[in-house]
Amino acid sequence: MEQVEKFLELAVIVLLASMLTGVASINYAAIAIGACVLSAGEESLVFWTIVACVIVSVVVHGVSAEAVTRRTIAVPQGSGARY
């Protein structure tokens, strides 16, 4: 049970860190675009680059979560647990 609690704590930290990184990226882009220091083409490039990075990050973390969970938590076979 202690392993499960440690894993859940780690999972929450990773989730919050990835969410905060995405939110921070969007915030920095909004500041740069709002400050009118970029040309129209640069604004579009920055915006879509950040959108793509956030989407890729969410997908990669979602796809890899189950595999990492399986390797992190030792679940007895036949226990019925999904991990």
Image (spheres, rainbow, N blue to C red):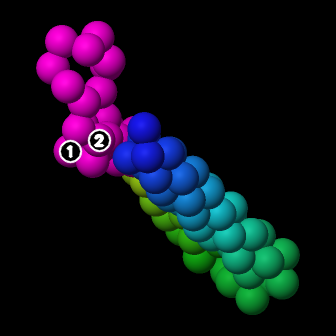
Nearest the eye: 33 or 64: 64
Residue hosting label 2: 73
Q: Which residue occupies the extreme bottom position in the image?
A: 37
The Cα atoms of the two marked residues, 1 and 2, are separated by: 6 Å
The percent position of residue 31, horizontal first and vertical second, equals 79, 78
Q: Amino acid at mark 2?
A: Ile
Q: Quadrant of the N terminus?
A: top left
- Kindly indicate the quadrant of the structure image that contains residue 23: bottom right
Provide the secondary structure element on which disc 2 rests: loop
* 79 lies left or right of 32: left
Above/below status of 78 relative to 50: above
* 23 lies left or right of 36: left
Binning the other alpha carbons within 10 Å of mark 2 as few (below 14), some (14 to 19) or many (20 upward) gives: some
Q: Which residues are magenta?
A: 59-83
Q: Amino acid at mark 1?
A: Arg
Above/below status of 43 relative to 80: below
Q: State the residue at coordinates (32%, 18%).
A: 81
* 11 lies left or right of 34: left
Residue hosting label 1: 71
* 45 lies left or right of 67: right
Above/below status of 25 relative to 14: below
Q: Is residue 60 rendered magenta in the image? A: yes
